[in-house]
Image (cartoon, rainbow, N blue to C red):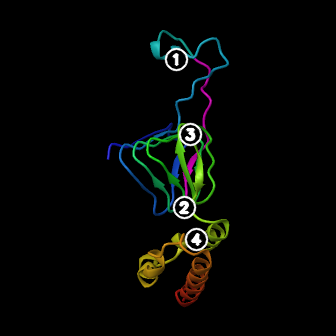
Protein backbone atom coordinates (compact mmCIF):
# COMPACT_ATOMS: atom_id res chain seq x y z
CA UNK A 1 0.00 0.00 0.00
CA UNK A 2 1.36 3.39 -0.96
CA UNK A 3 4.40 1.99 -2.79
CA UNK A 4 5.88 3.57 -5.92
CA UNK A 5 8.15 2.51 -8.75
CA UNK A 6 9.78 5.30 -10.80
CA UNK A 7 11.85 4.49 -13.88
CA UNK A 8 12.41 5.52 -17.48
CA UNK A 9 10.51 3.04 -19.63
CA UNK A 10 12.71 1.33 -22.17
CA UNK A 11 15.89 2.40 -20.37
CA UNK A 12 15.73 0.47 -17.12
CA UNK A 13 13.38 -1.96 -15.43
CA UNK A 14 12.58 -3.59 -12.12
CA UNK A 15 12.55 -7.39 -12.28
CA UNK A 16 10.94 -9.14 -9.32
CA UNK A 17 11.27 -12.85 -8.54
CA UNK A 18 8.87 -15.19 -6.82
CA UNK A 19 7.65 -14.95 -3.23
CA UNK A 20 8.82 -11.38 -2.74
CA UNK A 21 6.99 -9.57 0.06
CA UNK A 22 7.14 -6.15 1.57
CA UNK A 23 5.66 -3.71 3.98
CA UNK A 24 4.01 -0.36 3.38
CA UNK A 25 5.24 2.58 1.28
CA UNK A 26 8.14 0.88 -0.51
CA UNK A 27 9.96 3.13 -2.99
CA UNK A 28 11.90 2.06 -6.05
CA UNK A 29 13.55 5.12 -7.59
CA UNK A 30 15.35 3.52 -10.49
CA UNK A 31 16.13 6.68 -12.45
CA UNK A 32 16.53 10.30 -11.45
CA UNK A 33 20.26 10.66 -11.73
CA UNK A 34 21.59 14.09 -12.57
CA UNK A 35 24.70 14.75 -14.59
CA UNK A 36 27.22 16.05 -12.09
CA UNK A 37 30.14 16.65 -14.48
CA UNK A 38 28.53 19.64 -16.20
CA UNK A 39 28.34 23.26 -15.14
CA UNK A 40 24.93 22.75 -13.48
CA UNK A 41 22.73 19.88 -12.30
CA UNK A 42 19.61 21.88 -13.24
CA UNK A 43 17.28 20.44 -15.86
CA UNK A 44 17.19 23.50 -18.14
CA UNK A 45 15.24 21.64 -20.85
CA UNK A 46 12.23 21.77 -18.51
CA UNK A 47 12.10 25.55 -18.97
CA UNK A 48 11.54 25.22 -22.73
CA UNK A 49 12.84 28.02 -24.95
CA UNK A 50 15.07 25.57 -26.83
CA UNK A 51 17.26 24.84 -23.79
CA UNK A 52 18.88 21.40 -23.63
CA UNK A 53 20.75 19.23 -21.17
CA UNK A 54 23.40 16.59 -21.39
CA UNK A 55 21.71 13.18 -21.27
CA UNK A 56 21.50 12.03 -17.65
CA UNK A 57 23.46 8.94 -16.64
CA UNK A 58 21.27 5.88 -16.29
CA UNK A 59 21.25 2.97 -13.87
CA UNK A 60 21.17 -0.60 -15.09
CA UNK A 61 18.10 -2.77 -14.42
CA UNK A 62 17.24 -3.43 -10.78
CA UNK A 63 16.64 -7.03 -9.74
CA UNK A 64 14.91 -8.50 -6.71
CA UNK A 65 15.39 -12.26 -6.72
CA UNK A 66 13.25 -14.81 -4.85
CA UNK A 67 11.98 -15.18 -1.28
CA UNK A 68 12.84 -11.59 -0.28
CA UNK A 69 11.23 -9.50 2.48
CA UNK A 70 11.41 -5.69 2.42
CA UNK A 71 10.38 -3.73 5.52
CA UNK A 72 8.14 -0.66 5.63
CA UNK A 73 9.41 2.43 3.81
CA UNK A 74 12.47 0.76 2.31
CA UNK A 75 13.88 2.77 -0.61
CA UNK A 76 15.87 1.20 -3.44
CA UNK A 77 17.81 3.32 -5.90
CA UNK A 78 18.60 2.00 -9.38
CA UNK A 79 20.95 -0.68 -10.59
CA UNK A 80 20.83 -2.89 -7.50
CA UNK A 81 20.52 -6.63 -7.06
CA UNK A 82 18.82 -8.14 -4.01
CA UNK A 83 19.75 -11.82 -3.81
CA UNK A 84 17.57 -14.78 -2.82
CA UNK A 85 16.35 -14.99 0.76
CA UNK A 86 17.37 -11.45 1.76
CA UNK A 87 15.60 -9.41 4.45
CA UNK A 88 15.76 -5.61 4.21
CA UNK A 89 14.97 -3.67 7.40
CA UNK A 90 12.31 -0.98 7.60
CA UNK A 91 13.37 2.49 6.41
CA UNK A 92 16.56 1.17 4.86
CA UNK A 93 18.09 2.93 1.86
CA UNK A 94 19.64 0.70 -0.79
CA UNK A 95 22.14 2.96 -2.58
CA UNK A 96 22.71 2.94 -6.36
CA UNK A 97 24.13 -0.34 -7.66
CA UNK A 98 23.56 -2.07 -4.29
CA UNK A 99 24.64 -5.71 -4.15
CA UNK A 100 23.57 -8.13 -1.42
CA UNK A 101 24.62 -11.60 -0.35
CA UNK A 102 22.03 -14.42 -0.40
CA UNK A 103 20.15 -14.79 2.89
CA UNK A 104 21.64 -11.61 4.35
CA UNK A 105 19.82 -9.20 6.64
CA UNK A 106 20.43 -5.57 5.65
CA UNK A 107 19.46 -2.39 7.46
CA UNK A 108 20.38 1.28 7.67
CA UNK A 109 21.00 4.26 5.45
CA UNK A 110 22.87 3.25 3.45
CA UNK A 111 21.88 -0.38 4.01
CA UNK A 112 24.66 -2.62 5.25
CA UNK A 113 24.86 -6.31 6.06
CA UNK A 114 23.83 -6.78 9.71
CA UNK A 115 24.19 -10.55 9.71
CA UNK A 116 23.19 -13.64 7.79
CA UNK A 117 19.93 -15.44 8.46
CA UNK A 118 21.67 -18.81 8.59
CA UNK A 119 25.11 -20.41 8.74
CA UNK A 120 27.15 -20.68 5.55
CA UNK A 121 26.39 -24.40 5.14
CA UNK A 122 22.65 -23.82 5.52
CA UNK A 123 22.74 -20.89 3.06
CA UNK A 124 24.58 -23.05 0.50
CA UNK A 125 22.00 -25.82 0.89
CA UNK A 126 19.11 -23.37 0.49
CA UNK A 127 20.63 -21.85 -2.64
CA UNK A 128 21.12 -25.36 -4.04
CA UNK A 129 17.48 -26.29 -3.35
CA UNK A 130 16.00 -23.13 -4.98
CA UNK A 131 12.53 -24.28 -3.92
CA UNK A 132 10.81 -21.34 -5.66
CA UNK A 133 11.63 -22.83 -9.08
CA UNK A 134 9.47 -25.94 -8.53
CA UNK A 135 6.69 -26.76 -10.99
CA UNK A 136 3.32 -27.27 -9.29
CA UNK A 137 4.86 -25.32 -6.46
CA UNK A 138 1.90 -25.04 -4.13
CA UNK A 139 1.21 -28.76 -4.26
CA UNK A 140 4.85 -29.43 -3.44
CA UNK A 141 4.91 -26.84 -0.61
CA UNK A 142 1.75 -28.40 0.82
CA UNK A 143 3.42 -31.81 0.81
CA UNK A 144 6.61 -30.37 2.36
CA UNK A 145 4.92 -27.82 4.65
CA UNK A 146 6.46 -29.22 7.84
CA UNK A 147 9.92 -28.50 6.45
CA UNK A 148 8.87 -24.92 5.68
CA UNK A 149 7.83 -24.34 9.30
CA UNK A 150 10.95 -25.80 10.95
CA UNK A 151 13.27 -23.30 12.72
CA UNK A 152 16.47 -23.58 10.67
CA UNK A 153 18.52 -21.77 13.35
CA UNK A 154 18.11 -24.25 16.22
CA UNK A 155 20.45 -27.09 15.28
CA UNK A 156 22.65 -26.86 12.20
CA UNK A 157 23.10 -30.64 11.82
CA UNK A 158 19.34 -31.29 12.05
CA UNK A 159 18.71 -28.40 9.64
CA UNK A 160 21.17 -29.83 7.11
CA UNK A 161 19.46 -33.23 7.39
CA UNK A 162 16.06 -31.63 6.75
CA UNK A 163 17.42 -29.66 3.79
CA UNK A 164 18.97 -32.84 2.36
CA UNK A 165 15.53 -34.46 2.64
CA UNK A 166 13.92 -31.44 0.95
CA UNK A 167 16.46 -31.67 -1.89
CA UNK A 168 15.82 -35.40 -2.29
CA UNK A 169 12.04 -34.86 -2.30
CA UNK A 170 12.47 -32.08 -4.84
CA UNK A 171 14.43 -34.36 -7.17
CA UNK A 172 11.81 -37.12 -6.83
CA UNK A 173 9.01 -34.62 -7.42
CA UNK A 174 10.73 -33.28 -10.53
CA UNK A 175 11.28 -36.80 -11.86
CA UNK A 176 7.65 -37.78 -11.21
CA UNK A 177 6.22 -34.56 -12.72
CA UNK A 178 8.40 -34.34 -15.84
CA UNK A 179 6.10 -36.65 -17.72
Q: Position of residue 47 (x, y in %)?
A: 46, 12
Crowding near pointer 2: few (<14 within 10 Å), some, many (20+)? Answer: many
Classify 122 as above or below 165. above
**Between tags 1 and 4, which lies in front?**
4
- Using the numbered discs, state the Cα–Cα distance from disc 3 to disc 4 in whole angstroms: 26 Å
- Using the numbered discs, state the Cα–Cα distance from disc 2 to disc 3 in whole angstroms: 20 Å
Crowding near pointer 4: few (<14 within 10 Å), some, many (20+)? Answer: some
Q: Position of residue 117 (x, y in %)?
A: 56, 61
Q: Which residue is mark 1?
A: 43
Classify 4 as above or below 16. above
- Using the numbered discs, state the Cα–Cα distance from disc 4 to disc 2 in whole angstroms: 10 Å
Give the quadrant of residue 118.
bottom right
**Secondary structure at numbered mark 1:** loop
**Between tags 3 and 4, which lies in front?**
4
Q: For residue 30: magenta? A: no
Give the main secondary structure, helix, strand or loop, of the magenta stretch. loop
Q: Which residue is mark 4?
A: 130
Asked whether residue 82 appears in the rendered view, the answer is no
Sequence-first disc among 2 and 3: 3
Q: Which residue is mark 2?
A: 85
In the rendered image, the residue lying farthest to the top is: 49
Q: Which residue is mark 3?
A: 78
Amino acid sequence: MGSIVKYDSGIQSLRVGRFVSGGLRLKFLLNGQHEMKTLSTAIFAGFGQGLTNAPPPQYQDSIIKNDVWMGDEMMMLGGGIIENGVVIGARSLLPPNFRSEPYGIYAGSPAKLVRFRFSEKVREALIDIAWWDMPNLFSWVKEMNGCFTFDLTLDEQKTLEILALVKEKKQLWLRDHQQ
